[in-house]
Image (cartoon, rainbow, N blue to C red):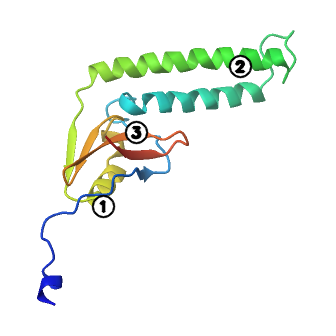
Amino acid sequence: MVLVASACGHAQRPERKTYVVSEDARGVGTAEGPGTGGSGAEAYCGEVQKQCFQKCWRRKPPVTSVPKHSAMHHEYCTKTCREEFMKCVEEQEALERQAARPELRFSSMGAALDWLREHKAEVALGTVVVVAGMAFTLAVAPAGLLVLSPI
């Protein structure tokens, strides 16, 4: 009974899985600019491209000879949003080169998640977060979730 009550005093390692920090990645890095480089850049830009296409597809094309919801309209939106994606990736890579990635350390996953939720604007995607000796990176999942993924 005494052995159970005096369980191990050090922090337990978190599971090797992805943890959701927030349902929405908006606002990440706003304290230092748009900072979304790192491992989440491609997922972030992919989400930007997806939203671009949806917006483009809902609107009438600027070229009057292109009928709305036609194959030509689809091609126009695909091309336009691919350009947006490439521009986004280039911007994120430039931000990544400029940024010195801070490393955050926490003794428990709960403490890490709580801190990240409260300080979302102060961190950039790609930031390394160490929890009880295990490394994670801050990223955006394809659904737009802000997550901690194991490295």
Task: Characterize the local packing of mark 2: few (<14), some (14-19) or many (20 or more) Cα atoms within 10 angstroms.
Answer: many
Amino acid type, label 3 = Ala
Label 3: which residue?
Answer: 139
SS of the residue at dot 3?
A: strand
Q: Are marks 3 and 2 in contact (CB under 8 Å)?
A: no
Who comes first in sequence, dot 2 or dot 1?
A: 2
Q: Quadrant of residue 15?
A: bottom left
* Identity of the residue drawn at 16% across and 90% down: 1
SS of the residue at dot 1?
A: helix
Q: Position of residue 102 (x, y in %)?
A: 22, 36
Q: Position of residue 118 (x, y in %)?
A: 33, 52
Q: Position of residue 126 (x, y in %)?
A: 33, 34
Q: Residue furthest bottom?
A: 1
Amino acid type, label 1 = Gly
Task: Characterize the local packing of mark 1: few (<14), some (14-19) or many (20 or more) Cα atoms within 10 angstroms.
Answer: few
Q: Position of residue 56 (x, y in %)?
A: 71, 24
Question: In whole angstroms, how far apart are the C-alphas of marks 1 and 3?
Answer: 18 Å
* Identity of the residue drawn at 29% across and 19% down: 97
Residue 110 disc label = 1
Q: Is 4 in front, or is 58?
A: 4
Label 2: which residue?
Answer: 77
